[in-house]
Image (spheres, rainbow, N blue to C red):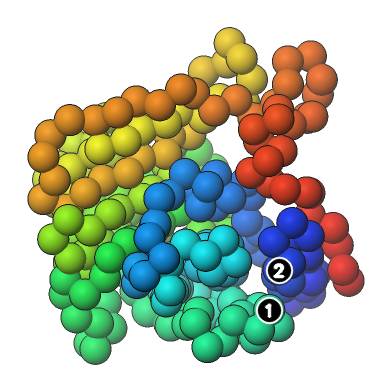
Amino acid sequence: MMETLDYLQGFDLQLPQARDGYRFSLDPLLLCDFAEIGVRARVVDLGTGSGIIPQLLARAGKGREWLGLELQPAMVERARRSVSLNGLADVVHIEAGDVRALPDDWRGESVDVVMTNPPFRPPTRGRVSSGVERGLARFELAGGLSDFLRAAAFLLKNGGRFYIVYLAERLAELLDGMRTYRLEPKRLRLVHSRTGAAAKLVLVEGRKNGRSGMTVAAPLIVYQAGKGREYTAEALRIVAVSLAGVS
């Protein structure tokens, strides 16, 4: 499969991506900015894809050890190559595996933070993306929301933090599922493309076995009104600079 090597200049990260396969969007950048993670935390990213989330967190100093789990072998290989290119192999580790059956050596209650940018859509809603790589990354063909929540609940220590970016239209399902798996919702932020538009995404923080009570933050607006795809000041800060192709 043909690849591009893309460069996130603001984070000094090189990311090999399939030219015609799954390519990450703004979602993981928003999630990493939203997450509040201590410098000594052990962090797991479920469904890591290109490995962008653990690498962004490593560059930002959020945590001290990062582990990404990815189902698709080609994406595992690319993520590992990216980690090596970026000089992060000592602290960021990519492992092949399935959220529905975690690797045997992964212990329960051993992680401080779990992150995920999971597939958003059931295969019964909308047209499944062409190509296996895109389809698995965007649609729940190999694990749905409950599988990611169950895995997070198993891995997290008591009081550990869970962070997810998800479709706003499935917010009720998300919050209900988080409570089912004792990941009490504590903080929520809706993401709107423009002022006055309906929210498309939601960022949520949960706490394992946390007390009830949730803060709803001010909405995040991505694009300036009447200026096409020009970012707002906050979105520009999060993105740092746009992707610049390297090859």
Name the residue beneath numbered marker 2: 13
Q: Who's the residue at 38% across and 60% down the image? A: 38
Can residue 44 be seen?
no
Tell whether 44 sits left or right of 2: left
Can residue 34 be seen?
yes
Amino acid type assigned to the residue bearing label 1 in the image: Asn
Where residue 3 sits in the image (x, y, percent)?
A: 77, 73
Where residue 190 sits in the image (x, y, percent)?
A: 45, 28
How far apart marks 2 and 1 lie (CA) works out to 6 Å
- Furthest residue toward top: 196
172 relative to 236, above or below:
above
SS state under label 2? strand
Q: Who's the residue at 66% across and 84% down the image? A: 87
SS state under label 1? loop
Amino acid type assigned to the residue bearing label 2 in the image: Leu
Considering the image in quadrants, where does the N terminus appear? Answer: bottom right
Q: For mark 1, does the 10 Å Cα neighbourhood hold few (<14), some (14 to 19), or many (20 or more) residues?
A: some
Q: Residue 140 appears in which quarter of the rendering?
A: bottom left
Q: Residue 63 appears in which quarter of the rendering?
A: bottom left
Total tally of numbered discs in the picture? 2
**For the residues bearing labels 2 and 1, Cβ distance under 8 angstroms:** yes
For residue 232, which numbered disc appears in the image? none
Q: Who's the residue at 13% across and 61% down the image? A: 158
Where residue 118 sits in the image (x, y, percent)?
A: 42, 54
Q: Residue 171 appears in which quarter of the rendering?
A: top left
2 relative to 234, above or below:
below
Tell whether 135 sits left or right of 140: right
Where residue 216 sits in the image (x, y, percent)?
A: 34, 25
For residue 86, which numbered disc appears in the image? 1
Q: Who's the residue at 78% across and 64% down the image? A: 7
Q: Earlier in the sequence, mark 2 or mark 1?
A: 2
Considering the image in quadrants, where does the C terminus appear? Answer: bottom right
